[in-house]
Image (cartoon, grey):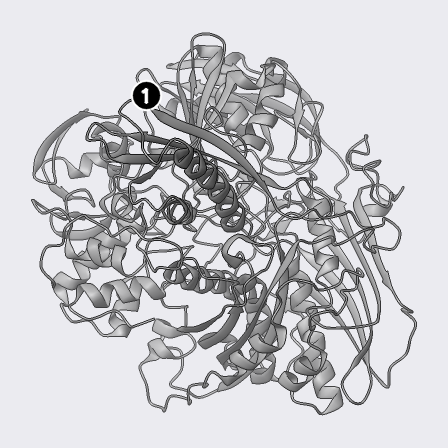
Amino acid sequence: MNITVTVNGERHEADIWPGESLLFALRERMGLPGSKNACEQGECGSCSVLLDGRLVCACLVLAAQADGHEVVTVEGVAGDGDLHPVQDAFVQAGAVQCGFCTPGLVVATVDLLRHTPQPSDDEIREALSGNLCRCTGYAKIFDAVRLAAGGELAPR
Amino acid sequence: MSSAPTRKLELGRIGEAVKRVDGIPKVTGEFAYSSDLVAAGMLWGHTVRSPHAHARIVSIDLSKAVGMAGVHAVLTHEDVPGDKRYGLEFADQPVLAFDRVRYFGEPVALVAAEHPEQARRAAEAVEVEYEPLELVVDPERAADQPGIHPQRWTEGHGYRDDPRPNVVRDMRIVRGDPDAEGEVSVEGYYESGLQDQAFLGPESGLAVPDGEGGIDIYVATQWLHVDRDQVAPCLGLPKDQVRIHLAGVGGAFGGREDLSMQIHGAMLALHTSRPVKMVYTREESFFGHVHRHPSRIWAEHRANRDGKLVTVRMRILLDGGAYASSSTAVTSNAAAFAVGPYAVENALIESTSVYTNNPPCGAMRGFGAVQSCFAAEAQMDKLAAALGMDPVELRLRNALAPGDELPTGQKLTGSLPVAEVIRRAAAIPVPEPEELPRDSLRLPGGAGNTTRGEGVRRGVGFALAFKNIGYSEGFDDYAAARVRLFADSGGELVAEVHCAAAEVGQGVTNVILQTARTELDLENVVLAPGSTAEVGSSGSTSASRMTWMAAGAVQAASRAVRDELERRGGKLSEGEEIDLERIYRHPRTFPLEPQTGQVTDGRAHVALACAAMRAVVEVDVELGLTRVVWIGTAQDVGKAINPQAVHGQIEGGTAQGIGLALMEEIQTRDGLITNASFTDYLIPTALDMPPVDAELVEDPEPDAPYGVKGVGEPPTVVSTAAVMSAMRDATGRELNRVPVRPDDICL
């Protein structure tokens, strides 16, 4: 079947098998592999994207369901800019190691700060609890969120 | 939010807290991981896996699968072009199972198809008839049951050969008089479960035939050259026709030391003459790599009233699962670090690994030291209680000091600031208990809102650990690097570094660039993609060795290039270049004497690193729920090449140790994994991790470039023990098993 999805402001058409997830269509049919495939069952958040502005796991959405809708992936969060401030904060804070969780965490953090520009530590932890990271122990991810929210990095 | 940033990063030298070179492509989604690769005409590979833990293969019928839509190849062991077996240290593992399967999920057949769903369906259509065989799943009975391998793969390799069936390695360290009595004695029995590396990037890669019979394999791995050396013989190809290239690695932690899809993808690609991509699902990933050895440990510690250890006796049993992988080295490591960084004159350490039909085990961060540290530190707490002595004081009183000897007889010659890490960790202020009422997120049970504080008990624990850096026991441990210096079109000097060191997330890319910039006194340095075709082996990203070894190799190659540049008058004209490769070796190590485990010459381990940690937990003893409140740690890091990255390793390594203490365990029933998903195999989330106050103790290692030490493993080794110490303090229970289960801590 054919679908048309607006991804990061661009119209993408794809001929898909109906069982394909939005994640598969993004990665394998639309040339956008930034969203990651760590569990493909909605447990890890590595495929987090915005679907019509709502944070979803792209692995749990059928590509067919996204037909006619708008998707923003990690490749699109910066818009016309070079880096979104959340992306820059992740680099500055040392929140990236292997980086496989990073695209999902960037999208989830963009979503968090849109709704809660000055999150408390508990709000950060709860908002990101659906995004697994195996490398960092999360401390520098929390630093990155605070930095992106206008805070400063703790001296070290 | 801050104003729109730019992409430029400052590029640092040794000791500067620089940002990751790969940070920007990783935050934008541009970084190409092994599962992101595509090629024109690409097919998808899929693996048919055994549903049995131990069974004879009666027949394999491919007839239904081969005719299915989109299917281009269905292969079995009969299609393996070369050697039928491979292995990291012993070639005991079939490329595809023949005559029998030895573990649940073992590869039996391969499919290549145009769409991954076609490949999956064809794999389901492969009909394999099995006849179940007697299961060997209890490691304590394994040596009395029929051997699951007819051949004795690990015999005759210089170990203490043990004729019993299913024994992989049986080693002893005998020191002084192991029967020497102390005034006080404590005994204990300890168990640890089957932990998974749970790296987020699943096993994956792309195999591309070169049209001339050779193959290029782009894969996430920890050691490109050892992959090539295993892949080539199984494909029946000379090594130079098998080129392994490092694709982006989504975490490793030991789980990518062994092969996963490399040979399989290459077989399908060579058979179909088309590129083949394989990407494991999360469920498949639990079958796709080796795990941390489950352990059973019996320990007795004897000491005098003043707290000085007299004798340590330990028996360690490790379940190696179906294939050897690195079990022999894990067995040795578990023994070598069994006592902990303490001086003791008398010891008997017996360490045995066995084959079973459980999931295969091999390398995982900490590599044998994790299991014995958990037991040894529990024993030290028990001893402190028996002596009525402060546990920190007991550890200080026994701390190894320069010139002391390890139970192997190895004399401490390098850096190992044991007393200092104890003092520094113990001096970090422990946070006061937070008052009630408080948000349920900051109580055991978290968002489950299961308590307002009733039934919650606080505990504070302490632990100490050490581990080797680099390969040991006589292994020829080396790393190569190549530096190509040339003048660009503007006449500016540019250095291109080639090094096969696998960047798995730990930041070795930065180490390589910082080293080259420092040694060449040049900002314009780039790192070429890692490939077996361009440079010699760097050895594995494991054993906390890559920072040291890569820095040594790049330093040597950079200095050679610098010297040559000076010889040419300090300038290169356009088109002129200097291209030199150098190999770095750390000081030689020697094997242990097989019967006594004593050093035969010099040292068995080139260097050691230690860490001390205090943990605070709160336990809801009515529901069996735990919250780790805070971690304070001091770690011996030699010299921090990049302090931000070192802190990241400590925080991340601590998370994995907390995971083993509280939640992470692959569950098996008769060898069958029952929780192969992130729904059922739990790793710490953002809500589970406490703040980690880490202090870096810089005591340069005299034999290492810039005084560096690896930093990845000590936090994982010490944190399981530290958290369990706190759990015992909170509950008053002995808690001799990790991960702890709710009913262990319900009072």
Residue A116 location (% of width, % of height)? 15, 68
Does residue B85 sit above or below A62 in this rendering?
above
Res. B96 in view:
yes
Residue that appears at 58% across and 77% down: B420
Front position in the image: B691 or B44: B691
The quadrant where residue B226 appears: top right
Residue B635 location (% of width, % of height)? 52, 69
Q: Mark 1 points at which residue?
A: B39
Front position in the image: B730 or B696: B696
Image quadrant in which the N terminus of chain B is located? bottom left
Residue B85 location (% of width, % of height)? 67, 25
Q: In this view, does B214 lie to the left or right of B313?
A: left
Residue B696 location (% of width, % of height)? 47, 70
SS type, badge 1: loop
Q: Assess disc 1: are there few (<14), some (14-19) or many (≥20) residues with their C-alpha within 10 Å of its C-alpha.
A: few
Does residue B77 sit above or below B134 in this rendering?
above
Residue flagged by tag 1: what amino acid is it? Ala
The quadrant where residue B528 appears: top left
**Which chain contains the residue that carries disc 1?**
B
Q: In this view, does A64 lie to the left or right of B595?
A: left
Does residue B466 sit above or below A132 in this rendering?
below
Residue that appears at 69% across and 84% down: B394
Image quadrant in which the C terminus of chain B is located? bottom right
The quadrant where residue B413 appears: bottom right
Residue that appears at 13% across and 64% down: A115
Query: How many marks overall?
Result: 1
Res. B498 in view:
no
Q: In this view, does B654 lie to the left or right of A148?
A: right
